[in-house]
Image (cartoon, rainbow, N blue to C red):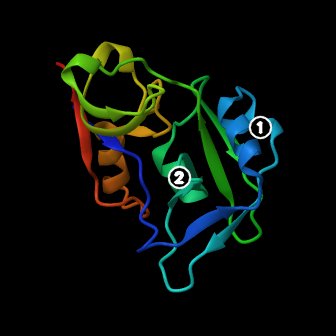
């Protein structure tokens, strides 16, 4: 199974901008109780099309009600659904709580900084059993969100708009 980087296309589609402080967004991502945060966003982009899938602060997946219902079920203890405050559209942020230590570092091609943080993952080998049934996930020392081929197929089948042309960043070791 292939693994993809979750990334939205802000050249082709409208995007959202946070009206909330970056420190609050950092706290939100580290919290298991994101629903206690009030995050305000505005939709940006005049000529671009309206997507079904957004990305907040280049790291937080955000879905319209249509995308949320088409991709359902997206719930449980591993992903927290948090309603955003937006005047023009109902949006839900996905607080990805399921960090998976599933990247086989020795078999992967990646760049890390002096602090051990992953800067770029060129090609990763992921342990299937550690992924479980997670379709959205993060890995230690990386701020990126990754999605499975299973989820990408569902997004494409339902014709949900917003993602860039899918880029494979790795595969499972099965």
First-in-chain label (2 vs 1): 1
Task: Measuring from the top left, give residue 16's x and y in whole percent.
Answer: 61, 64
Of the pair 15 and 49, the residue shown nearer to us: 15
Of the pair 172 and 149, the residue shown nearer to us: 172
The quarter of the picture where the N terminus appears is: top left
| Left or right of 63, for residue 17 | right
Task: Measuring from the top left, give residue 41's x and y in whole percent.
Answer: 72, 62
Of the pair 17 and 94, the residue shown nearer to us: 17
Identified at 40% across, 38% down, the residue is 146
SS of the residue at dot 1?
helix
Rate crowding at label 2 as few (under 14), some (14 to 19) or many (20 or more) other CA atoms within 10 Å: few
SS of the residue at dot 2?
loop
Res 114 → quadrant: top left
Indicate which label's residue lies in the foreground, 2 or 1.
2
Q: Could you give the CA–CA distance between mark 2 and mark 1, rounded to whole angstroms?
A: 20 Å
Task: Measuring from the top left, give residue 78's x and y in whole percent.
Answer: 57, 25
Residue that lies at the very extreme toward the top in this rendered image: 129
Q: How many marks?
A: 2
Q: Which residue is mark 2?
A: 58
Identified at 44% across, 63% down, the residue is 162
Identified at 53% across, 72% down, the residue is 14
Of the pair 69 and 87, the residue shown nearer to us: 87
Q: Which residue is mark 1?
A: 35
- 136 relative to 42, above or below: above
| Left or right of 137, for residue 109 | left
Identified at 56% across, 78% down, the residue is 45
Rate crowding at label 1 as few (under 14), some (14 to 19) or many (20 or more) other CA atoms within 10 Å: some
- 99 relative to 64, above or below: above
| Left or right of 4, for residue 97 | right
Q: Are marks 2 and 1 in contact (CB under 8 Å)?
A: no
The quarter of the picture where the C terminus appears is: top left
Res 27 → quadrant: top right
């Amino acid at each position: 199974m292939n693994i993809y980087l979750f990334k939205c296309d802000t050249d082709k589609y409208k995007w959202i901008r946070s009206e909330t402080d970056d420190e609050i967004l950092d706290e939100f991502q580290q919290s298991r109780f994101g629903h206690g945060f009030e995050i305000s966003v505005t939709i940006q982009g005049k000529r671009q099309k309206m997507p079904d899938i957004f990305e907040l602060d280049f790291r937080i997946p955000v879905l319209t009600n249509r995308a949320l219902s088409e991709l359902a079920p997206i719930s449980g203890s591993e992903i927290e659904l948090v309603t955003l405050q937006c005047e023009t559209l109902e949006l839900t942020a996905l607080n990805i709580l399921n960090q998976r230590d599933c990247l086989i570092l020795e078999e992967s091609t990646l760049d890390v900084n002096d602090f051990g943080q992953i800067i770029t993952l060129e090609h990763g080998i992921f342990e299937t059993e550690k992924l479980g049934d997670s379709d959205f996930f993060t890995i230690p020392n990386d701020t990126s969100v990754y999605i499975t081929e299973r989820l990408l197929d569902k997004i494409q089948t339902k014709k949900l708009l917003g993602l860039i042309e899918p880029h494979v960043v790795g595969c499972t070791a099965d």
